[in-house]
Image (cartoon, helix red, strand yellow):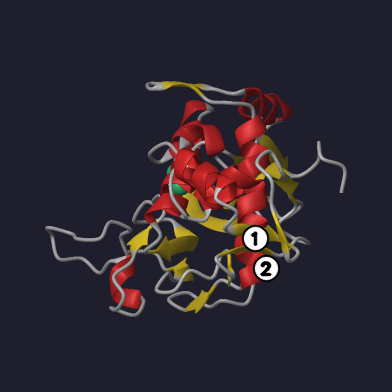
Amino acid sequence: MPSDEGERLQKVLAALGWGSRRVCEDLIAEGRVTVNGEVAELGRRVDTTVDDVAVDGVPIGARPGLVYYLLNKPRGVISTAHDPQGRPTVIDLVPGEPRVFPVGRLDGETEGLILLTNDGDLAHFLTHPSMGVDKEYVALLRGGSRLSEGELRRLRQGVDLDDGPTAPAKVGQRSDGTVVITIHEGRNRQVRRMFEAVGHDVERLVRVRIGPIVDGRLRPGAWRELSLDERRELIRAMAEAGRR
Ligand code: URA
């Protein structure tokens, strides 16, 4: 691969939880990192979907003890770790050990895909606004109402919310009236508030994609582990988002 393609090795390592970028640079400088079996030089770029990267012989993304779950959150389950009101939480739906926490939030009424992990570095990377990977939602509007062309345009361009304007979004209306909206920010109740800003209430909201992660077969309340490929794709998507 030409040296100016792919992601910087220390950035990939940091995103996968091997330490700060500085620490990861040291790992590389100390000759502890290999790419496709060869000791990597500082400044090396890699494509994690094809290159085999290892630290001290351990494949990256395979750090022992780290787990990555994908859950299909049902309506009425909240996505904080604890709820003072005693409502069911996403934590109740996945294995109790090791302890994990949700990556970002879905509001109580919103359904769909949410990641849970005990990998604090990855979670931090994934939720940092500058790293915001695309999140795709399907919305059903109250009363079966439909968006006009002007409303679609406003949503696409960005609308003013009380915490500031939203970034441009991808928005499309399907023939059954449901709206598919893709954003990369993660503000509280953002999609609902965007629709309210153009005069519509959301009746049902489902997150169907987080970056490259999709799963149309995971039933509400069910979870599964992310595959190594999915974790690699996620890192790639985050690195791309970081350049946006
Ligand atoms: N937008 C919302 O309105 N709710 C969510 O849970 C996520 C995005």
Amino acid of disc 2: Asp
Tags 1 and 2 touching, CB below 8 Å: yes
Q: Is residue 126 left or right of residue 215?
A: left
In the image, taking residue 200 as reference, residue 243 lies left or right, namely right
Residue 133 vs 90, above or below: the answer is above
Q: Is residue 85 visible?
A: yes
Ligand 1 under 8 Å from disc 1 Cβ: no
Residue 233 versus residue 23: which sits nearer the camera? 23
Q: Where's residue 207, x and y in %?
A: 54, 56
User: Which quadrant holds residue 54?
Assistant: bottom right
**Which residue is located at x 29 percent, y 78 percent?**
97
Disc 1 target residue: 232
- Horizontally, residue 89 falls left or right of residue 11, namely left
Q: Is residue 201 visible?
A: no
From the viewer's perspective, is 80 left or right of 220?
A: left
The residue positioned 33% from the left and 58% from the top of the image is 79
Residue 229 locus on image (x, y percent): 67, 68
Residue tagged 2: 229
- Label 2: how many Cα within 10 Å (few below 14, some 14–19, many 20+): few
Of all residues, the one furthest to the front in this rendering is 30
